[in-house]
Amino acid sequence: MKGRKKILLLALFAVATLVFSACSKTQTNNDFSVGGIVITDADFFEISILVNGIKTDYSLDSSGRFNLSHLKSGDVITFSKEGYSFNSYTVGGFSVDGIEIVGTKCRYDVLTFFDENYGTVTGAGKYEYGETATLSLTPANHFEINGIYEKDNLVSSTGEYSFTVTDDRVFVVKFSKKKYPITIEKTDEACVVAAPESAAFGEEITVSASDDENFVFAYFDVDGTKYYDKTLNFSVKSENTKVNAVFLKRLSKPEISFDGRRISVVKGENAKRCEVFIDGEFLLNTTSDKAVSLAEYNVSDGAHNVLVKVKGDDFGENESALNINYVRPYDTPKNVGMLIEEDKVYFVFQQVLAASGYEIFMNGQKVETPPDKKASGESILVRVDTLFTENGTYAFSVRATGARPESDMSFAAEYTFKGTLSAPVAKIENGVLTVSHEKDVKFLVEINGVNVADKLDENKSLALSDVLEKGTTTAKIKITAMLDGYKPSSVEIIYNAEE
């Protein structure tokens, strides 16, 4: 038994030695050959054969077969044609024939990125190599195509872009809000209006108008609605926005002058009215050229700014300004008139506070007649004796003088002097006083200094006993005849009841 086992072991060892020897010879052999066929729809003559990535001189025959020799174990055989993908073969420790290599067309991704609120893009997807892909762009309402970009480079700005697929492609499609024209119509090309030339639908825009030396903004008209503010803000709601900017031709500047006490205003052509302001405060308005006495409006002493604005129908307003230094003159004398007292006629007026003197004018000529003063209620009345010498009509006026500018001349008080009345006639019979005159005069009857003219009856008579105190037998009686336009005249008599 032991002998048989030993013989069997020796036999197995011999076989193993032969196998090992055969294997060793295969692994060290570097001259293998590989043959097979390529199955593909590509043109065989356009397919390159590479070994370890290096292009060889081998090629496929017309049926797609190949046979490579002088290969070593571990060599990698690959096949190449643009747009196709092939499986590879790695050489083992032996030669081989009949392998199959399959080549298929590559498929590539075409990707698009865009904002769906702005538009749509079709054409993205998977494409085989060499296929034509077409990207079609449709902007949303009020949007337009900005462009198709690949790696930040603009490749198309139209609504359709076609290309042959040879690789993965990634596109960014940009849409932008469509700009619509903003049309500005102006009264005159010289009128100043600032506005964008175009704007997107729904965009908030600003249109502003400015006055200049020739035109004044009146209003904006948008679709029949008028807006009077110089700045107009609104959202674009139309594909053709039109704004009519209405301006008025500006009036010429008013002329202002100052003579120390009055502001004189000349409106100018086409001006219908003007407004006068002092230091920004409204003073007056007028429809005619006018000289304005500042004293009448109680304007204080000092520096002032005078502004005059003129306006006219269908014309733009204009204005002029003048800086003045005003010293207020004395007030114009008031309550000017004529006063008839007994045998004198006076020109009278109310005293002006702070005035140190007066200039009196008769018929336009200054007269040197000293005035006197007389209390009259709460004011002081200044009297000037007229000293008439000839019949005629006389006009009297006065102005106050002193340290300040003289006052304006008062209005004229007129008096027609017809002469001096003849003396009235008076007689006393049986204690009854009777007066008479050749003219229809008014009588002033003073008995012992008391006026009793109201006691005269219709016959111009009165009983002295009715007016004298009881027991009085004597009296001094003065009768004065007065008539408008005449210098009064008087007569005096002494009454003695015992005579």
Image (cartoon, rainbow, N blue to C red):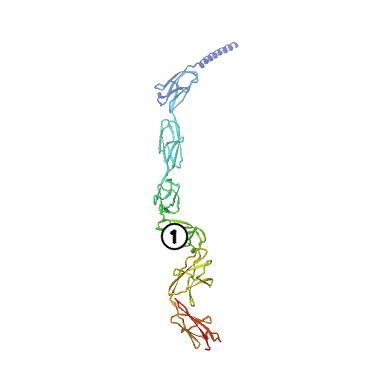
The answer, for residue 176, to whether it is visible in the render is yes
Helix, strand or loop at label 1? It is strand
Examine the rendered structure and indicate whether residue 197 appears above or below residue 50. below
Report x, y in % for residue 480.
Answer: 48, 80
In this view, the residue in front, 219 or 299, is 299
Give the residue type that dot 1 points to.
Val
In this view, the residue in front, 275 or 99, is 275
The answer, for residue 219, to whether it is visible in the render is no
Examine the rendered structure and indicate whether residue 312 appears above or below residue 341. above
Dot 1 surroundings within 10 Å: few (below 14), some, or many (20 or more)? many
**Residue situated furthest right in the rendering:** 2
Report x, y in % for residue 179.
Answer: 42, 44
**Residue situated furthest top in the rendering:** 3
How many circles with numbers are drawn on the protein? Answer: 1
Examine the rendered structure and indicate whether residue 336 appears above or below residue 326. below
**Residue highlighted by disc 1:** 265
Report x, y in % for residue 268.
Answer: 41, 58
Picture quarter with the N terminus: top right
Report x, y in % for residue 495.
Answer: 52, 85
In this view, the residue in front, 485 or 307, is 485
In this view, the residue in front, 16 or 170, is 170
